[in-house]
Image (tube, rainbow, N blue to C red):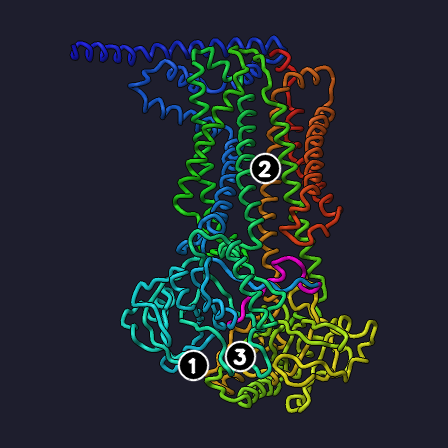
Amino acid sequence: MMIPRLTSRARSLWRGVTRRRVLEAEMAEEFRLHMEMRAEDLVRAGLSREEAKRRARLEFGSPAQYRDEGSLSRGLRWFDGVRIFGLDVKLGLRALKRRPLYALGVAGTLGLGLAAAMITFAVAWKVWLAPLPLPDPDRVVRLYELEPASPETGTSEESRRRLLSPTLLGDFNAHSWRTIEMFSAVMRGEEGEPWIREGETRSISRLALFPNGFGMLGIVPELGRLPSEDEVLLTEPFWRTAFGADPNVMGSEMNLGWGVPRIVGVTRLPSGYPGDVDIVMVGDYGMTEDEVVEGTDARVFRWVEAIARLRPGHTLEEAKAEMNSFLAALAEVHPIHRGWSMEVVVLADDLLGPFRGVLALLLAAGGTFLLLAGVNVLGLVAARRVESRQDRSIRLALGASEGRLLRGALIDSLVLALVGSLAGVLAAYGLIDPIRSMVPGDVPRLADITVSPPLVAGGLALGVALGGLIGVLGYLISRGARPSVGRAPAWRAVGVGGRRALVIGQVALTTVLTAGGAAVLHRVSTLGAIDLGFEPEGVSTTSTVFSRDRYTSVEQSQNARRSILEGLAARGIPAAMGINTPVSGDDVVPPMGLIADASLEEIFSVFHAVSADYFSVMGIEVLAGRPFGPDDDASPQPVAIVSEEFVAQYFSAGIPVEDVIGRVLAPVPGTTSGMTVVGVVRTTRHQGPALPVMPDVYIPLSQYTNPPVTLVVRSEPDQVAEAVSAVVTQVDPDLRWSPLVSYTSHLREWFAPFRLQLIMIGVLGTLGLVLACLGLYSFMAYQVLTRRQEIGVRKALGASDGKLALEVIIRGVALASLGAIIGLAAWYRLLPLSRELVDGIEAAGYIVPLSVAVVVGGSCVLATLIPAVRSTQVDPAVTLKA
């Protein structure tokens, strides 16, 4: 039975192959007859014979194309599958080659939407969605002490958050907790800590954890063991760069200036937290006696970042309630905690902080733009199908089936989708690094953002799937054409109302995003124009710590500071030193309380310890009295300089600044007697231009012993770097300073969250504008193509080209205007949510969003010009005959 069946099938195949030539000859003859019939129709319509033949050839296309179509519709499908697929691809490429702008538009639009979706998902996944690589990350929390609400601190928990004092953290660790398993501090050393090796000194960074912190953060040595006291753990990148990945360094010592700890292991820190450092050590609780200034309660120094891990089965609310109960009991013994409370937040949520809203917007917009890109591609494909309806009629007349035409349309779309997907992947690869470089450095896990192989595979699969869906939908839209040769098919527009709504929605979404970006830009420019109270332009800064191991007495550190300033002055370089410099994150001394008048309650001010020339170098104007002088260091009576905000808030209302000179303030923590006010200066915005100003109190630098100190120089870094290095080396060759940077870099860092918002909203707004213009273009082109017969009739009746083009433009203007109006309404409706993302964004008022709406609407109107011009190129003779 098997052999006769195979013989019969082979005979059938042979007949099919030999018969193919006859069929193709018949098809060629039929095609020739149809061409001649169409040419005769055009001659009768008034065209010359040569022009009629040329027009017929343009309408019918290449004979080879229809020969291939007919052969495929009657071919041996199961035997000739590979050949059929090859011919399909060949036909598709041939058609796309004839329409390069169409192919570029479809592939480019799909690639643009896919690249946006891939980049937004890559950023959102690493920064937001992917869990921190910690053991039980949902149980690891960060602790804050909340300052009592006041006009200076505000009422929100974020504005009242303060770090913990080492003493309070020690109390927590000594207590037995029902909801908390363990505590740890996360203490990062000063940048540029010295490491002396073979007579050379280089800067390294240090991290100190309590013993519980290693297990809490999942820090496991890859080589060696965990450190104990006077031992260090090298991080894996530092081990490779500094020691060449030599395992024999285990057991050797590192000269760190303040000590010589022993190397006991190598580890790789978890991504995202606690950050990039070179060495990890074990810290301890509390402060040493020489770190606590006489007369000061150590609990006022809230500078320790603290984390904890919850016990399984307990919630944040339970832990917060238990800690507040403990703190309230502690306040009975230590009044400094009275009125304060505890805040417990999941570490991952706290790291994400102000970026969560932007990332949510980014992720939603990425998906939305991919959808809009697909809709725009569908519009282009639908317009192309309408334009080629004559070809479709001929193919059906020649015997091609609906399934055959569907397969051709599907392959066309898949080819374009594959090209667009590859372009999108390449664009994502090319854009991820520039975007990552523009994103602020404090965004968690920024370095891990990448276009990974799984994301590439998912992007390609999604692009091809979207292309297949668009191919099927585009073909279904074009099914209104009936098989007819030489006559225009009856056509019924499908989904015009839905596509019109999509175009309006695109313009509205673009208006919202672009208005948001413009409002953020307006907010940034407004903040940038605020007077900071000092002149950051032309000032450079660097910092160091005069270690107690090297400077055992107060006189030694004071002499070293004085020698450095005198050496710079001798070179003609204005310089000063201080702590708690504004807008730099240099908050070594926390806000301290004092009583300005006996009738007033204790108030908190920002304290600054500065050298004599600090005000002139920083450009802070002295309004009354005098700046500090050399005699103030040795004066038996402590002196202070206050800001005009201090005078306005804490002295009698309306008192002139000159009248507070000579007044004695109550003793400040760290002093045993009251300070005499010798000067009044302008108020500085210590925490940045967006936050409320706080009163400033300045004291001579000599009143603080061995603090981390900042050197400020009135010159650009590249002009004085060598001079500063030479002077410091002359005073102390082993004293290490952080790199000299411009003071404006601190302002750029402060504006970093705004920059992230500007980048993300700007990218999304630009992408939305491109897609909106493309969507309006494809819709209007679709409308012109479906109305060619109507336009031809109107031209034959005397309608001018200008009138026809104007009507197309008016339709585009109506759609763009409606979308812009809806976008404006949505923008003002979403203002409460926008305030959570960007504080003060409502200050943009009405002019900025209205201007954006005009720009967006005008850009979209420009996209209608090409369809408007095409409407004037319709030949009335051809459309009337059709």
Assess disc 1: are there few (<14), some (14-19) or many (≥20) residues with their C-alpha within 10 Å of its C-alpha: some
Residue sitting nearer the eye, 407 or 72? 407
Write down the quadrant of residue 543 in the picture. Answer: bottom right
Q: Position of residue 617 (x, y in %)?
A: 66, 78
Q: Secondary structure at mark 2?
A: helix
Q: Amino acid at mark 1?
A: Gly
**Upstream in sequence: badge 2 or badge 1:** 1
Label number found at residue 722 = 3
How far is the residue under mark 2 from the one under mark 3? 52 Å
Say whether disc 2 or disc 3 marks the residue closer to the N-terminus: 3
The type of residue carrying mark 3 is Glu
Residue span colored magenta: 151-166
Give the residue at x 33% y 73%.
Answer: 263
Residue 437 in sight in this render: no
| Mark 3, secondary structure of its residue | helix
Q: Is residue 111 in the magenta section?
A: no
Disc number lying in front (2 or 3): 2
What residue did someone put label 1 on? 257
- Helix, strand or loop at mark 1: loop
Q: Percent from the top left, x then y, of residue 672?
A: 64, 85
Residue labelled with disc 2: 771
Residue at 43% in and 81% down? 258
Please name whichever residue, 655 or 130, is drawn nearer the observer in this view of the structure. 655
185 over 378 or under it: above or below: below
